[in-house]
Image (tube, rainbow, N blue to C red):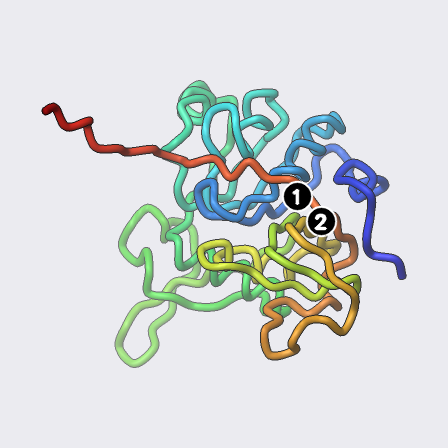
């Protein structure tokens, strides 16, 4: 099966439908699938549920989908960098399912591993626990969380071969690897594509069996919050 596509738009052809659930990798603006997000915006798909640690920033990353009112619901851990997110949520225009960050990561990993649910102490006695099953283990109370899967996962890696084997770099190796396993279809964008067999098997983070489509992208790599020292005076 040919996995390498010319661009993000063609890589998403036939995969999108209104009301679908999409996992989007990255942490803040690091390791986000910039090209695939732009293609989602251009496609016109709407009423989507997005599973992602955060929702980008105003005007960039997943924030562009939010600005265009394409997102119906977010399943997230941190959303504090986006003013439009705050406005839509407080106005009742956006649904939000908050998760502790470790719980979100484990829900995605569990979904990719075929595990329908698991118990955790995180959130016991808080709003997170409301309506969830409680169970005692060894005298401690735990709550049950369900695994997460998506109709489509879009991820960003550093390097791939033509079979879809992926290598991530540094902070980009956050939610991307587990999301690549939890989508019914996974589309990856990378900075470099090399021939099959070129990658050291011991360096591969995501085996190509999890990746159905692949593109080489160009990346802005915007800084989320730029902080600089004031210029020293003579």
Marking on residue 8: none
Picture coordinates of residue 109, whole percent (x, y)? 54, 64
Residue 182, quarter of the rendered image: bottom right
**Residue topped by disc 1:** 21
Where is residue 154 drawn, in percent x and y? Answer: 65, 48
Secondary structure type for disc 1: strand
Residue pictured at 33% horizontal, 65% vertical: 121
Mark 1 Cα-neighbour bin, 10 Å: few <14, some 14–19, many ≥20: many
State how far apart marks 1 and 2 are (Cα). Answer: 5 Å
Residue at x 72%, y 71% (from the top left corner): 198
Q: Point out the residue furthest to the front here.
A: 234
Q: Quadrant of the C terminus?
A: top left
N-terminal of the pair, mark 1 or mark 2, is: 1
Q: Is residue 26 left or right of residue 186?
A: left
Of the pair 199 and 97, the residue shown nearer to us: 199
Which residue in the protein does label 2 denote? Answer: 151
Q: What residue is drawn where x is 60% and y is 50%?
A: 156
The quadrant the N terminus occupies is: bottom right
Q: Is residue 12 above or below residue 95?
A: below
Q: Residue furthest left?
A: 234
Q: Position of residue 44 (x, y in %)?
A: 74, 25
Whether the residues at callouts 1 and 2 have beta carbons within 8 Å, the answer is yes
Residue in view at x 33 percent, y 46 percent: 127
The relative height of residue 59 versus residue 116 in the rendered view (above or below) is above
Q: Secondary structure at mark 2?
A: strand
- From the top left corner, tell me how far across and down residue 101 is, in percent: 39, 53
**147 vs 56, nearest the viewer:** 56
Asked whether, in this view, residue 179 is left or right of residue 7, the answer is left
Q: Residue 18 versus residue 227: which sits nearer the camera? A: 227
Q: Nearer the viewer, residue 196 or 127?
A: 196
How crowded pointer 2 is (Cα within 10 Å; few <14, some 14-19, many 20+) is rated as some
């Amino acid at each position: 099966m040919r996995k390498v596509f010319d661009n993000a738009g063609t890589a998403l052809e036939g995969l999108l439908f209104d009301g679908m659930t999409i996992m989007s990798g990255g942490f803040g603006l690091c390791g986000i699938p910039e090209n695939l997000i732009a293609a989602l915006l251009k496609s016109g798909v709407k009423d989507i549920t997005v599973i992602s640690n955060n929702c980008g920033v105003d005007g960039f990353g997943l924030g562009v989908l939010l600005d265009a009112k394409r997102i119906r619901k977010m399943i997230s851990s941190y959303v504090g960098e986006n003013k439009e997110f705050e406005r839509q949520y407080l106005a009742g225009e956006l649904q939000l399912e908050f998760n502790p960050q470790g719980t979100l990561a484990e829900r995605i990993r569990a979904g990719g591993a075929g595990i329908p649910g698991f118990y955790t102490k995180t959130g016991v006695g808080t709003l997170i626990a409301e309506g969830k099953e409680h169970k005692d283990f060894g005298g401690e109370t735990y709550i049950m969380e369900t695994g997460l899967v998506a109709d489509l996962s879009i991820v960003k890696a550093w390097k791939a071969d033509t079979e879809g084997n992926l290598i991530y770099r540094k902070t980009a190796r956050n939610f991307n690897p587990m999301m690549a396993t939890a989508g019914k279809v996974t589309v990856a964008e990378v900075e470099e594509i090399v021939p099959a067999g070129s990658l050291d098997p011991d360096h591969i983070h995501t085996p190509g069996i999890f990746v159905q489509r692949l593109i080489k992208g160009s990346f802005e790599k915007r800084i989320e919050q730029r902080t600089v020292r004031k210029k020293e005076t003579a």
